[in-house]
Amino acid sequence: GWLGDREEDDVEDHLGRPSWLNIDDRLGVVFSGTGDAVYLNRHYYKPYRAIADDLTLSRQANGQAVRAGEEAGSLAALIIPEQAHEDTPACRLDVLTGPVQSACLVTDDYLAAANFASDRRVCAFTRTRCEEVVVYAGATVVANGDTVRVDVPLNSGSACLLAETHSLRVDGDTRIDSTPDGGIFVTNTGTDGLAFEITSGEDAARHRSVDAGETIRIG
């Protein structure tokens, strides 16, 4: 807000590693990284052109040697314009584990995935299983034990944004295939009968069952 006479007038705030930030009720940021968040409140400008502060979401303070193929650091962020600060903490951003040269982020209602490899492939992204299994248009979801895997076909150097179509509350092992025409097929991959509830999407609140090794369509 004011102009200083020397660099020492700048104020640097070290914010640690918060899961979210909000800037003046104008921009919400939900993020995770390998470094610390730092806000630089500038007061000294040479030469003076405009007043501007700096916000670094993930600064790694110390230099490091990195061999070819090694990761220097990581940062995943969800940017929400025009968001009030009281709404930001409720926003979700999950980073799924995938093969090398790939990335997958999940937030409310959407999954974003990218394939940086030189070949087309089906990228398998995994996460810890939650109470509900979420289905995404055009992807295959495999729930087995405590793990959920999302298989996404991706061309070389491409990315996609998949919308959530359904969520299911299911206890057993299952595979859920979502086809381009909107079909949702649930396969019981366990050895016993499987009962589940559709908790969102078409037919929400409906209870269904499927025998071991069988497949039914729900969408």
Image: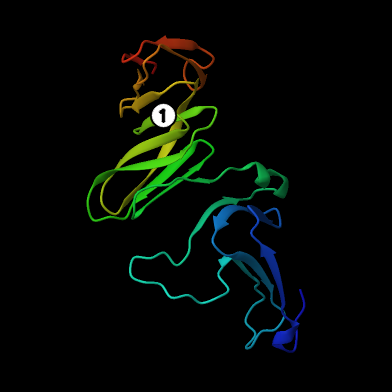
Q: Amino acid at mark 1?
A: Asn
Residue 140 found in image quarter: top left
Above or below: residue 127 compared with residue 49: above
Q: Is residue 183 left or right of residue 172?
A: left
Above or below: residue 23 compared with residue 183: below
Q: Is residue 114 left or right of residue 13?
A: left
Picture coordinates of residue 171, whole percent (x, y): 49, 21
Residue 183 found in image quarter: top left
Element under disc 1: strand
Picture coordinates of residue 209, whole percent (x, y): 43, 10
Picture coordinates of residue 118, whole percent (x, y): 23, 56
Above or below: residue 33 compared with residue 47: above
Instruction: Identify the residue under disc 1.
Output: 144
Picture coordinates of residue 130, whole percent (x, y): 53, 32
Neighbour tally class for label 1: few under 14, some 14-19, many 20 plus, Cα within 10 Å? some
x 39%, y 36%: residue: 149
x 31%, y 25%: residue: 181
